[in-house]
């Protein structure tokens, strides 16, 4: 039995890349989230480009499984000025969702060049430079979920953030940004456990994968990494806090054009451990 299929176009989304479709996407999400069914599919159709401002897709949903199928292109506001008055730290956020599968043949494009051009990291002497820029896609407090098959490109800062989540799989994704783009980590993991990253290609201006504090059981395999800084645990303990990172496995990873392979970064004032 096929799961119910819901199209964002039916909720008023406009796929011309110019009209803001944030409200339409939220309406479609709230509809599928409320469905009392085993499985439901929300589709972003191909051959369309959808402009979204910062938006949060929240649980707790009634459906046991939600497939968020992205076959078209999703783009962010193109200029930092368009973010004035909005959350400049996050763009697309999934919060508190279980049984979520985000996948498809489409693309998520953060169009981050405006942010890179005013980054304090690349332009420390620039008046009005910015240290904070939007993360493209955040999975916060999500359980038994996955991200697969998509292209995620040109994020203003981190491309994928997995935070406070458990049993999450990332597979068959392509994440790219120019080698000169600042702070554009491919995937950052923080306060999360049982995370699998495999069969993916990641090349950005920062770490392919970075692993923060309070993480455990992370398995990274069959990943092509580069350009970028490699795969990093840390940096840890900058504020002198107690850190805990354990059971990190990196295997069959090909590093090409990276500043490092796999490494651990710590601050002398930090306390705690990184252990197998």
Image (cartoon, rainbow, N blue to C red):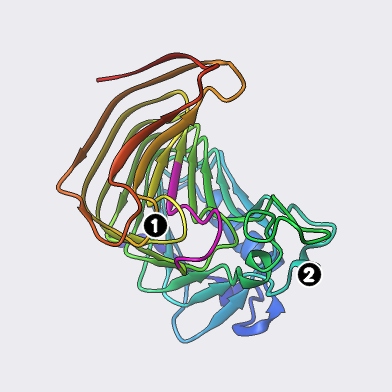
SS type, badge 2? helix
Is residue 184 part of the magenta span, yes or no?
yes
Q: Is residue 32 left or right of residue 119?
A: left
Q: Position of residue 119 (x, y in %)?
A: 67, 59
- List the residue tagged with mark 2: 82
Kindly identify the residue that appears in the image at 51 percent across and 19 percent down: 268
Q: Position of residue 148 (x, y in %)?
A: 33, 58
Q: Position of residue 197 (x, y in %)?
A: 29, 46
Instruction: Out of 42 and 159, give the one closest to the viewer.
Output: 159
The quadrant in which the C terminus is found is: top left
Kindly identify the residue that appears in the image at 54 percent across and 38 percent down: 96
Observer able to see residue 20: yes
Dot 2 alpha-carbon crowd within 10 angstroms: few under 14, some 14 to 19, many 20 or more: few
Q: Is residue 194 left or right of residue 199?
A: right
Instruction: Out of 201 and 226, give the one closest to the viewer.
Output: 226
Observer able to see residue 99: no
> Would you identify the image quadrant in which residue 151 lies?
bottom left
The magenta span reads 179-188
Kindly identify the residue that appears in the image at 39 percent across and 57 percent down: 228
Per the rendering, the mark at residue 208 is none
User: In the image, which is nearer the foreground, mark 1 or mark 2?
Assistant: 1
Mainly helix, strand or loop, the magenta region? loop
**Which of marks 2 and 1 precedes in the sequence?**
2
Q: Position of residue 225 (x, y in %)?
A: 29, 57
> Would you identify the image quadrant in which residue 13 lies?
bottom right
Per the rendering, the mark at residue 228 is 1
Q: Is residue 81 above or below residue 250?
A: below
Kindly identify the residue that appears in the image at 62 percent across and 60 percent down: 122
Dot 1 alpha-carbon crowd within 10 angstroms: few under 14, some 14 to 19, many 20 or more: many
Is residue 72 part of the magenta span, yes or no?
no
SS type, badge 1? loop
Calculate the distance from the C-alpha at mark 1 to the C-alpha at mark 2. 28 Å
């Amino acid at each position: 039995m096929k799961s119910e299929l819901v199209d964002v176009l039916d909720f008023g989304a406009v796929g011309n890349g110019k009209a803001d479709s944030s409200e339409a996407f939220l309406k479609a999400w709230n509809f599928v989230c409320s469905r009392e069914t085993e499985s439901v599919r929300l589709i972003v159709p191909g051959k369309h480009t959808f402009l979204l401002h910062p938006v949060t897709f929240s649980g707790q949903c009634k459906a046991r499984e939600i497939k968020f199928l992205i076959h078209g292109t999703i783009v962010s506001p193109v200029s930092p000025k368009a973010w004035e008055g909005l959350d400049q730290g996050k763009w697309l956020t999934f919060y508190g969702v279980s049984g979520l599968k985000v996948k498809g043949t489409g693309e998520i494009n953060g169009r981050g060049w405006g942010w890179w051009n005013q980054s304090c990291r690349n332009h420390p002497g620039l008046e009005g430079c910015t240290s904070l820029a939007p993360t493209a896609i955040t999975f916060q407090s999500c359980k038994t979920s996955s991200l697969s098959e998509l292209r995620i490109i040109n994020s203003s800062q981190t491309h994928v953030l997995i935070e406070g989540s458990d049993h999450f799989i990332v597979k068959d994704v392509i994440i790219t940004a120019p080698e000169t783009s600042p702070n554009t980590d491919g995937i950052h993991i923080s306060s999360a456990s049982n995370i699998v990253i495999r069969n993916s290609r990641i090349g950005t201006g920062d770490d392919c994968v970075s692993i923060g504090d309070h993480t455990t059981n992370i398995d990274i395999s069959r990943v092509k990494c580069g350009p970028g800084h490699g795969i990093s645990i840390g940096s840890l303990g900058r504020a002198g806090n107690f850190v805990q990172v354990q059971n990190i496995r990196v295997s069959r990873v090909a590093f090409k054009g990276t500043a490092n392979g796999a490494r651990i970064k710590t601050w002398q004032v930090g306390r705690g451990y990184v252990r197998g």
